[in-house]
């Protein structure tokens, strides 16, 4: 399994093009009557799987090794220009930028009244679609023209005063929107750096962090669409850090409701809406609410089916990843493990297609879920195959929670298969990893010691050991700081399955 193999940037761009985009590029290049070597270079690269300088130079002798980089750079720029022309009609921001550029050209030619008309016509679109920064840029350009030239605007009563008031209001909105965006990123950054709270002092630290960074002064203002979106996201992450999943869900719902109340924004920023829908599903999953998760999943699938043809590559990739993660989550929370296992072949094929554009950790999360589905279905050897893929992958350091749970599940699978000698050897390796850990679940740490104890006991004494450990786990399970750990690896359910001699437990694995 090879993830994210290094690719030539130009070849990667060409391989990402759809048939429509390639056809548009060919139409775009028809304007060139002279040297169009870059078109020939495109045709050669379009046939390649992996980039090779030697092949290019052999097929195109008119290109010297010395000038190959320049030709590739020129082709890259021409491809982007053709894509820009294609997406002007689809992407409102590109369209608004183009109109501002047209206004600058008109102004540079002394046609400042035409420039003002162009700006005025596009300003309404910027306001209607909540493009606050572009709206401010348009107003500032209008002010520049009005300040430097005597225009007929001066004859309209309160025209200039209105423009200045609008500029002041938009400046405030742009500033406060930036503050709310920063706040959202800061809260997410806290989670990335520190994870969930693990003690009462950490709760106090997070609360102080919120008070110090929340843009309190602007909360009393009439917030714009994106200010609300940033604020709801930040509050959702804050509650998520505190392990208050019910409260986090309320803010995720408010975030999604913004888009549902303003459907045009689902088209304008589908990725942000997709994320809102996904975190609603994650939090229903954390709350073990199969019915609500199933309904959200149905709604997500309907949105995806309706908008799939119009989503750009980035939004499409995000939607597919979140949709598939949520399908697996539903298999766990509904305890329908075979339904989840049946999804795996098609999911693996999709993952191979997305390797170049997807974070390796996201792909490994899928593999962990695959392993855990098979574990829940008592297919321990198959589970080990997926876990070994994660453990032996040379992709730098894994995220700690994924590494810890992978290693623990790996040990438990070997125990279930009766590989006690191998388990004794593997335990030492995992102990070294856990010793270095910055954020280790106490439940996992104690379970590691429990497995070590089992290896020193004859199998006949294991049932009694499970009975004793079950009592110890009861205390650990009551801790509010272990609320999430069982969603990754439900150790208590595994222990209980040995006491009750019933099929292996189902569990849940989160993916925020």
Image: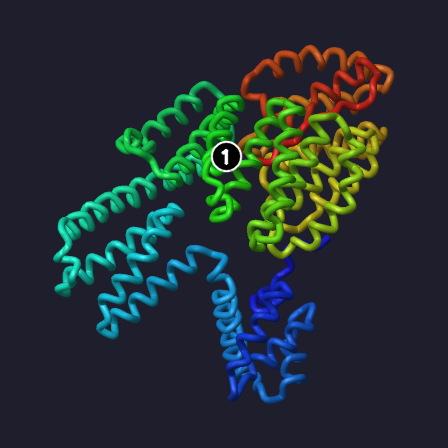
Expressed as whole percent of the image width and height from the top left, the position of residue 149 reads 14, 65
One can see residue 362 in this view? no
Q: Is residue 304 left or right of residue 260?
A: right
- In this picture the colour scheme is rainbow
Q: Is residue 486 above or below residue 398?
A: above
- Label 1: which residue? 256
Between 24 and 276, which is closer to the camera in this rendering? 24
Q: Which residue is found at the position 76% from the left and 23% from the top?
A: 505
Helix, strand or loop at label 1? It is helix
Q: Which residue is found at the position 71% from the left and 29% from the top?
A: 332
Expressed as whole percent of the image width and height from the top left, the position of residue 215 reads 31, 33
Q: Which residue is found at the position 67% from the left and 25% from the top?
A: 290
Q: Is residue 283 above or below residue 27?
A: above
Q: Is residue 473 left or right of residue 440?
A: right
Between 359 and 283, which is closer to the camera in this rendering? 283
Image quadrant in which the C terminus is located? top right
Expressed as whole percent of the image width and height from the top left, the position of residue 174 reads 30, 45
| Residue 60 found in image quarter | bottom right
| Residue 504 found in image quarter | top right
């Amino acid at each position: 399994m090879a993830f994210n193999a290094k690719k030539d940037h130009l070849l990667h761009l060409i391989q990402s093009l759809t048939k429509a985009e390639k056809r548009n590029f060919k139409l775009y290049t028809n304007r060139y009557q002279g040297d169009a070597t870059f078109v020939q270079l495109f045709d050669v690269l379009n046939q390649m799987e992996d980039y090779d300088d030697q092949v290019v130079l052999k097929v195109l002798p008119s290109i010297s090794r010395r000038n190959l980089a320049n030709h590739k750079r020129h082709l890259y720029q021409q491809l982007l220009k053709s894509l820009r022309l294609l997406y002007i009609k689809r992407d409102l921001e590109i369209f608004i930028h183009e109109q501002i550029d047209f206004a600058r050209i008109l102004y540079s030619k002394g046609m400042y009244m035409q420039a003002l008309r162009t700006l005025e016509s596009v300003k309404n679109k910027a306001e209607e679609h909540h493009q606050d920064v572009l709206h401010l840029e348009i107003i500032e350009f209008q002010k520049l023209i009005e300040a430097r030239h005597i225009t007929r605007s001066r004859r309209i009563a309160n025209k200039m005063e209105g423009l200045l008031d609008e500029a002041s209001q938009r400046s405030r909105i742009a500033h406060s929107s930036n503050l709310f965006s920063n706040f959202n990123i800061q809260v997410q950054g806290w989670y990335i750096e520190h994870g969930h709270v693990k003690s009462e002092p950490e709760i106090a630290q997070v609360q102080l962090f919120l008070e110090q960074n929340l843009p309190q002064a602007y909360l009393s203002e009439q917030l714009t669409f994106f200010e609300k979106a940033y604020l709801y996201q930040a509050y959702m992450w804050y509650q998520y850090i505190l392990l208050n999943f019910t409260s986090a869900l309320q803010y995720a719902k408010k975030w999604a409701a913004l888009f549902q109340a303003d459907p045009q924004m689902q088209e304008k920023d589908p990725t942000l809406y997709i994320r809102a829908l996904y975190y609603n599903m994650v939090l229903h999953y954390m709350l073990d609410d199969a019915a609500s998760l199933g309904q959200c999943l149905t709604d997500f699938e309907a949105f995806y089916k309706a908008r799939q043809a119009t989503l750009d590559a980035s939004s499409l990739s995000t939607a597919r990843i979140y949709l598939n993660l949520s399908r697996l989550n539903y298999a766990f929370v509904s305890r329908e493990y075979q339904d989840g296992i049946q999804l795996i072949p098609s999911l693996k094929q999709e993952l191979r297609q997305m390797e170049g554009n997807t974070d390796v950790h996201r792909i490994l999360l899928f593999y962990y879920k695959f392993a855990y589905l098979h574990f829940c279905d008592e297919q321990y050897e198959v589970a080990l195959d997926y876990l070994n893929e994660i453990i032996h992958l040379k992709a730098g350091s894994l995220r700690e929670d994924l590494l810890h749970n992978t290693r623990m599940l790996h040990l438990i699978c070997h125990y279930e298969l009766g590989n006690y000698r191998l388990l004794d050897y593997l335990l030492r390796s995992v102990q070294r990893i856990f010793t270095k850990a910055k954020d280790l679940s106490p439940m996992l740490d104690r379970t590691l010691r429990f497995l070590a104890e089992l290896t020193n006991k004859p199998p006949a004494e294991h049932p009694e050991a499970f009975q004793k450990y079950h009592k110890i786990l009861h205390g650990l399970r009551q801790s509010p700081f272990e609320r999430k750990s069982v969603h990754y690896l439900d150790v208590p359910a595994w222990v209980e399955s040995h006491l009750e001699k019933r099929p292996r437990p189902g569990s849940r694995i989160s993916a925020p």
